[in-house]
Image (cartoon, helix red, strand yellow):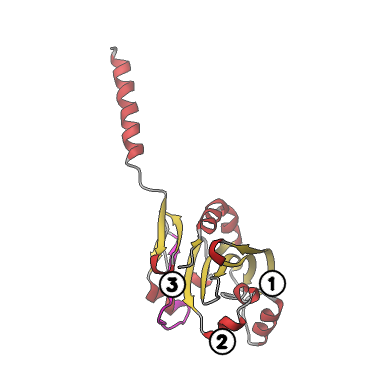
Amino acid sequence: MSRGRIIGLGMTLLALLVTGCAAPQFTYVTNSSAHTYFKVPNGWRQITSSALNAAVKSAPQSGVWTVGYDGDIRPAANHVLGATDGAPFVYSVVAPVNQATTNALSYNQLRDFFLPVTAASRATAAKSGFPLTSFHLVRDSMLTLAQGVHGVRVTYEYTYPGVGINTFDQVALTNADDTEVYLLLVHCLASCYSKHLSQIDTVMNSFTVRSP
């Protein structure tokens, strides 16, 4: 065998070894007790639940699970609210709902789970000094999944004063008896959202909820 063929064979074997040992493309995020999971690109970094709760000004609550992943090279919990988001931020919540909420839970409440989306909710928020402006609804679709899980996927935009337009892509679901809510939200600047649309769609489409 010639030296050139030996070198070529060696390079082929090296390529196969490198491919076989490559890092996984995605991190799988699982809440086994809630039968919920999704995946994020491997380079996105996890934010601690305590930091997320502080950023959204929410005290830890029994039975509530939160997790966040930031695609920014300098990940930060305050990106959960959309401040200068040049990279996608993933925020997920699994929370039980009380009996009163169960009795009244609607698709509109799922739409408004993170930010005001419906006209009525936006009007109420505006009266309370809600700072975001120029709401634009991009997508609003109802979802019916296995085992009675159902909800909505909404994509919408808000303008942050002094920052620019943020795009929010949200799936909000509840189980068959409306006793638990499951949220997955990805957002960043509108230009960032367009740039990373394929990745974001992969994250959103991976969201899986199975009722116990």
Q: CA distance from mark 2 to mark 3?
A: 22 Å
The three-letter code of the residue at mark 3 reads Thr
Q: Which residue is mark 2?
A: 100
Q: Which residue is mark 1?
A: 134
Residue nearer the viewer, 55 or 91: 91
Q: Residues within 10 Å of mark 2 (few under 14, many from 20)?
A: few
Residue 207 x %, y %: 51, 60
Residue nearer the viewer, 163 or 195: 195
Q: Earlier in the sequence, mark 3 or mark 1?
A: 3
Whether pointer 2 and pointer 3 mark residues with C-beta atoms closer than 8 Å, the reply is no
Residue 144 horizontal side relative to residue 78, left or right: right
Q: Residues within 10 Å of mark 3 (few under 14, many from 20)?
A: some
> At 64% across and 73% down in the image, what residue appears?
107
Q: Earlier in the sequence, mark 1 or mark 2?
A: 2
Residue 24 x %, y %: 38, 48
**Does the magenta run of residues contain 69?**
yes
Q: CA distance from mark 3 to mark 1?
A: 28 Å
Q: Nearer the viewer, mark 3 or mark 1?
A: 3
Q: CA distance from mark 1 to mark 2?
A: 33 Å
- Which range of residues does the magenta coloring cover? 55-72
Q: Which residue is mark 3?
A: 66
The reply to whether residue 131 is in sight is yes
